[in-house]
């Protein structure tokens, strides 16, 4: 059967004969994945060398290899073979190797020159997976430094070809025209109806009106299960429902992509796994929910969460192409045309939002510690890179300079994530190799049990070890996990021994030191992780009352994440395996209940407190600092103020307002803010508010002024003023808005001008008092009072206080303290 790509193959062969790199852009359904490798098989410029083609998924790799082998009339493993993490079918006769992404990096690390390989093909590169970006960067360096004859071909249906062509040295770009068959695109937004309910309705309508099999794109396995439940009843008799997702057992995946039985058609409910490189036999109709789910890494919490988001226009085009592979098709999109015009053109590259630990370790093995020295389409984010380096150094995979260690090299050989690889290697050293292998295999796959079975990893370990297999167990996945665990353990050598599942927490602490969790006191099952983040378990979970856990899987929410998988751990085990990270710290803080400084010694693991006890003595500097902060917060009103000190404060305050550069600000707010500066020398031994009752406040405040300032204060704003009788009367500087002199009226006779302070800059308010010490007049102008108001005051009071002098002329009268002097008799 002729395919559209066939028309481009001669040009492609000619181009690669002359150039060492090329970019091929071909729409979905044109046949590039299976036609191109076969066309290159006998190309003279390859001189019999092998072809390696990178596929983003295991199912796509296996399917492509099988199809190409069938085209040659052979079994897989002869001329065409494949390599995935858990399954390899190659032989000495294999010339075309279809590999998943991690395998390419392993081939390069094993042989930097890729000896025996003539071309590396990156298929479906538009997905921009992290491993594809890393593989292209490594292959490009290999090509430039070690293998000038090595060819590179980047292929995709929807691709921004220009940046890739530039990265490959202005490589030629070839385009394959058109797709195989036309596809009728229809839009069906859900409106106010929940989208999954609307999708179920659209599927039923489509099955009733369209012929052929139907492929439905959904975000993930959970949505596939829920939609299948909605569709269980009422499907036409000729329709077979088939789920399709990455963690599905191989035989179930094969059923989903195989031709339907005679007289029947299939309804395939798939994730993005069906978006590229797969031909699902019999499909005529694609129904696209418009979502995809991808991991998103937060370097701040070192956690990855799965995020559901709108697909890109490129993703939508890929999915549409699934409907036109075998004949004219239909694509129904669950969004509107206006929304389609607003879709992002391409998906965000995984390198921009992924955990970079694997990448950093791979490059360290390659001899690269600075990503800027490599050729990237998108440079890895600096924050994520730094976070990865920090974790790898903690896992002993990198040294202080960022170079790979012997332990790091051993970790790479296991084909696990760095966390799990470290756990397996250190577990072997502790005689826990079998348990470590079981755990690593478990955590490398999806959960064996459906949601609702609790978070305890102990239950899963019993399944792997064959103790029991309760209801709801995914037996296909269980078989896969057991096989992976067996391979991992046997790779370490030694006879098998029964793993102690109670040590699971200890091993997990090796892999996830930042996810050791301590239960918060009281309330529901809330935990704090060593990295400072919050997490929780449902109250009904068996682990919900455990004081200490190590969390293997959680949803990655920034504030409080739900714990999916965890194991209990003893504090003694944490001290055993994480002793180097446990610090002894002295904490001096303010205890509001006792109103005192509290000193404690704690042993901490990140944000977790393993032990907390009183500290007999703390450094005076720390105690003083905490005491100062407590007073600053409470205010200086709790200091032992006297009336005299408040007067001092008001006097200095007047001079500060007059000359702010020359005099300190002694307002309550300023004194609180600078408390440590002016009160510090007198705080030795002061550890609680009650001690402040004996604080030498007069001495501390006075020390804020130098000797000339103290003299100037007494001179310009004296505490007392001498009146005409010779009495020294106290001035109240706290009065508002001016200082007040409260004096008996008779003591002011003969004084014409109102006194002023600070060389006339501060006015003085005179409160003239009756003999009963009650104010009878308030003035700042004595001369005016004597001339205008005094006569009226005299008239009102002379009869009430006849023993006191009330002269008609206050200007010439003699000031007098007491009552009238009796006249002398002749």
Image (cartoon, helix red, strand yellow):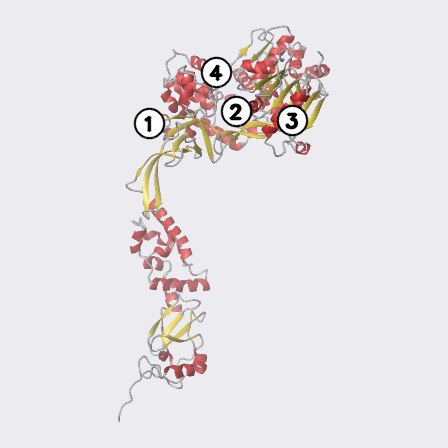
Q: Earlier in the sequence, mark 2 or mark 1?
A: 2
Q: Nearer the viewer, residue 680 or 88?
A: 88
Characterize the local packing of mark 1: few (<14), some (14-19) or many (20 or more) Cα atoms within 10 angstroms.
Answer: few
Is label 4 or label 2 in front? 4
Give residue 118's quadrant in the image: top right
Q: Position of residue 185 (x, y in %)?
A: 69, 26
Q: Position of residue 58 (x, y in %)?
A: 56, 17
| Image position of 131 (left or right of 490) | right
Mark 2 and mark 1 residues within 8 Å of each other at the beta carbon: no
User: Is residue 776 in view?
Assistant: yes
Give the Cα distance between marks 3 and 2.
Answer: 29 Å
Mark 3 and mark 2 residues within 8 Å of each other at the beta carbon: no
Q: Residue at x 38, y 35 (%)?
A: 520
Q: Earlier in the sequence, mark 3 or mark 2?
A: 3
Residue farthest to the left, as pictured: 826
Residue that badge 3 annotates = 316
Characterize the local packing of mark 2: few (<14), some (14-19) or many (20 or more) Cα atoms within 10 angstroms.
Answer: many
Mark number displayed over residue 475: 4
């Amino acid at each position: 059967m002729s395919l559209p790509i066939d028309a481009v193959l001669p040009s492609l062969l000619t181009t690669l004969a002359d150039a060492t790199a090329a970019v091929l852009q071909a729409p979905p359904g044109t046949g590039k994945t299976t036609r191109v490798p076969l066309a290159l098989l006998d190309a003279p410029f390859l001189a019999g060398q092998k072809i390696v083609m990178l596929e983003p998924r295991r199912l796509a790799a296996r399917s492509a290899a099988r199809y190409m082998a069938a085209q040659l009339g052979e079994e897989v493993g002869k001329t065409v073979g494949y390599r995935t993490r858990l399954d390899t079918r190659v032989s000495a006769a294999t010339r075309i190797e279809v590999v998943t992404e991690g395998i390419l990096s392993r081939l390069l690390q094993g042989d930097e020159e890729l000896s025996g390989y003539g071309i590396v093909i990156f298929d479906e590169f538009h997905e921009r997976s992290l491993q594809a970006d890393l593989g292209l960067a490594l292959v490009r360096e290999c090509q430039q430094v070690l293998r000038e004859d090595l060819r590179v071909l980047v292929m995709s249906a929807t691709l921004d070809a220009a940046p890739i062509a530039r990265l490959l040295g202005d490589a030629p770009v070839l385009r394959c025209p058109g797709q195989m068959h036309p596809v009728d695109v229809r839009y069906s937004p859900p409106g106010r109806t929940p989208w999954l309910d609307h999708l179920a309705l659209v599927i039923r309508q489509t099955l009733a009106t369209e012929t052929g099999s139907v492929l439905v794109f959904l975000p993930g396995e959970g949505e596939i299960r829920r939609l299948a439940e909605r569709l269980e009843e009422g499907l036409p008799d000729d329709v077979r429902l088939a789920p399709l997702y990455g963690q599905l057992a191989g035989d179930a995946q094969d059923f989903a992509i195989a031709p339907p039985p005679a007289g029947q058609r299939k309804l395939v409910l798939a994730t993005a796994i069906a978006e590229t490189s797969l031909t699902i036999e019999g499909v005529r109709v694609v129904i696209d929910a418009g979502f995809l789910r991808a991991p998103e890494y937060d370097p701040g919490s070192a956690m990855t969460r799965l995020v559901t988001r709108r697909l890109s226009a490129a993703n939508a085009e890929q999915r549409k192409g699934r409907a036109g592979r075998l004949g004219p098709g239909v694509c129904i999109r669950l969004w509107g045309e206006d929304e389609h015009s607003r879709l992002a053109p391409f998906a965000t590259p995984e390198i921009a939002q992924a955990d970079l630990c694997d990448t950093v370790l791979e490059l360290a093995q390659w001899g690269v510690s600075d990503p800027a020295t490599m050729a990237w389409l998108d440079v890895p984010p600096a924050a994520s890179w730094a976070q990865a380096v920090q974790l790898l150094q903690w896992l002993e995979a990198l040294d202080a300079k960022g170079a790979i260690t012997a332990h790091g090299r051993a970790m790479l050989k296991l084909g696990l994530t760095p966390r799990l690889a470290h756990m397996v290697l250190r577990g072997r050293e502790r005689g826990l190799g079998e348990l470590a292998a079981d755990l690593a295999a478990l955590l490398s796959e999806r959960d064996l049990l459906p949601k609702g079975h609790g978070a305890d990893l102990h239950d899963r370990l019993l399944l792997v070890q064959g103790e029991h297999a309760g209801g709801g167990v995914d037996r296909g996945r269980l078989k896969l996990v057991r096989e992976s665990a067996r391979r991992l353990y046997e790779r370490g050598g030694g006879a098998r021994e029964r793993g102690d599942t109670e040590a699971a927490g200890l091993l997990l602490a090796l892999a996830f030191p930042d996810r050791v969790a301590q239960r918060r006191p009281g309330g529901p099952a809330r935990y704090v992780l060593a990295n400072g983040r919050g997490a929780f378990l449902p109250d009904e979970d068996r682990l919900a009352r455990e004081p200490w856990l190590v969390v293997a899987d959680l949803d990655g929410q920034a504030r409080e994440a739900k714990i999916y998988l965890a194991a209990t751990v003893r504090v003694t085990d944490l001290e055993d395996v994480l002793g180097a990270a446990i610090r002894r710290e002295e904490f001096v803080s303010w205890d509001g209940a006792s109103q005192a400084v509290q000193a404690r010694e704690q042993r901490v693991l990140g944000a977790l407190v393993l032990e907390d006890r009183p500290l007999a003595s703390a450094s005076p500097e720390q105690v003083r600092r905490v005491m100062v902060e407590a007073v600053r917060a409470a205010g200086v009103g709790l200091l032992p103020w006297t009336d005299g000190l408040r007067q001092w404060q008001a006097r200095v305050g007047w001079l500060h307002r007059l000359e702010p550069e020359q005099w300190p600000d002694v307002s309550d707010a300023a004194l609180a803010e600078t408390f440590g500066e002016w009160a510090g020398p007198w705080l030795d031994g002061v550890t609680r508010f009650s001690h402040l009752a004996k604080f030498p406040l007069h001495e501390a405040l006075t020390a804020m002024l130098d000797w000339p300032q103290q003299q100037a204060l007494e001179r310009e704003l004296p505490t007392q003023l001498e009146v005409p009788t010779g009495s020294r009367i106290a001035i109240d500087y706290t009065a508002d808005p001016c200082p007040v002199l409260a004096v008996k009226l008779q003591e002011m006779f003969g004084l014409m001008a109102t006194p002023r302070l600070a060389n006339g800059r501060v006015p003085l308010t005179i409160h003239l008092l009756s003999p009963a010490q009650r104010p009878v007049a308030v003035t700042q102008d004595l001369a005016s009072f004597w001339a205008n108001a005094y006569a009226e005051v005299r008239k009102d009071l002379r009869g009430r206080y006849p023993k006191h002098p009330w002269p008609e002329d206050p200007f010439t009268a003699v000031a007098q303290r007491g009552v009238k002097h009796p006249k002398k008799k002749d």
